[in-house]
Image (cartoon, rainbow, N blue to C red):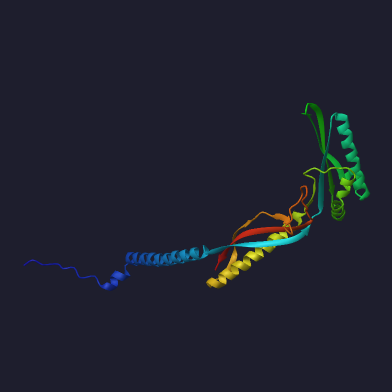
């Protein structure tokens, strides 16, 4: 009679006590926990990225009234005659009358300078004629004195100076760089106020600036005057205006 050998079953306690099994189970557990944490972080990161992308774009306005600090008056005049010498002599007399006019008003001689001359020759009814044109420019930082000169410009006409088209006073504000930083700050504050109103209506709050664009600075006549040309009055009272575009984060 043959003997039959049967292996005894391995106890469950021995299976869990095996070192290889324990290491395998530990690795599987760490992997599972890592997957869960990674999934959570990925999902949370997407939510945070979506929140970070929420923003509102608004415009801010800043305006400031200023007074021009430079006056420029270009005076154009001419004379026509049958010979060049006579035309030139007439222009020279007008030039002296103009210098005397500004000298009497108290302007320094250097404030008035010739800025252009032109001579043309043509035939009129078979007769040769010459026209001499000249320009003189007053450049002054004495704004009140310049305004006074404009008010009395008809005195030049009384002295025989015929003002051509293109003769006119222009006032310029040259200190824009000095007020730019403060105006940009004001425009940004105005933009934030608009963004806060939007955020309030949408149940959010305004965060930091995401991006910003500074618009062009415009210097215009305060009262809508246009000036500089013949028959048109310019004034030294200007309005500086800037519009900024700001993108704010919402949170």
Residue furthest front in the image: 125
Q: Residue at x 59, y 70 (%)?
A: 197
Question: What x and y, as percent, mark residue 237?
Answer: 78, 58
Question: What x and y, as percent, mark residue 79?
Answer: 84, 36
Instruction: Looking at the picture, tell me which residue is in the foreground, 118 or 41.
Output: 118
Above or below, comparing residue 163 to residue 235 in the picture? above
Q: Residue at x 40, y 67 (%)?
A: 36
Residue furthest left in the image: 1
Q: Quadrant of residue 160?
A: top right
Question: What x and y, as percent, mark residue 60?
Answer: 64, 62
Instruction: Looking at the picture, tell me which residue is in the foreground, 2 or 124.
Output: 124
Judge whether residue 155 can be spotted in this image.
yes
On the rendered structure, is 176 left or right of 2? right
Quadrant showing the N terminus: bottom left
Instruction: Looking at the picture, tell me which residue is in the foreground, 92 or 136.
Output: 92
On the rendered structure, is 162 left or right of 60? right
Judge whether residue 205 can be spotted in this image.
no
Quadrant showing the C terminus: bottom right
* Count of numbered marks: 0
Question: What x and y, as percent, mark residue 229?
Answer: 76, 48
């Amino acid at each position: 009679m043959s003997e039959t050998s049967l292996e005894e079953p391995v106890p469950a306690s021995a299976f869990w006590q095996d070192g290889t099994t324990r290491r395998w189970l530990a690795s599987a557990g760490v992997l599972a926990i890592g997957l869960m944490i990674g999934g959570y972080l990925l999902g949370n990161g997407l939510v945070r990225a979506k929140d970070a992308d929420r923003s509102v774009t608004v415009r801010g306005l800043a305006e400031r009234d200023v007074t021009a600090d430079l006056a420029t008056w270009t005076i154009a005049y001419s004379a026509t005659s049958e010979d060049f010498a006579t035309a030139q002599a007439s222009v020279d007399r007008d030039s002296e009358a103009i210098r005397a006019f500004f000298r009497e008003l108290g302007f320094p001689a250097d404030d008035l300078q010739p800025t252009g001359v032109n001579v043309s020759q043509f035939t009129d009814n078979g007769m040769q004629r010459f026209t001499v044109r000249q320009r003189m420019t007053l450049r002054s930082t004495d704004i009140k004195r310049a305004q006074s000169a404009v008010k009395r410009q008809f005195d030049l006409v009384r002295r025989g100076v015929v003002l051509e088209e293109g003769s006119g006073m222009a006032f310029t504000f040259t200190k824009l760089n000095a007020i730019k930083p403060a105006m940009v700050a004001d425009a940004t504050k105005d933009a934030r106020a608009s963004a806060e109103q939007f955020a309030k209506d949408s149940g959010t709050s305004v965060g930091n600036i995401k991006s910003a664009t500074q618009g062009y600075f415009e210097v215009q006549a305060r009262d809508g005057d246009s000036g500089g040309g013949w028959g048109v009055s310019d004034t030294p009272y200007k309005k500086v205006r800037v519009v900024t575009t700001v993108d704010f984060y919402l949170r």
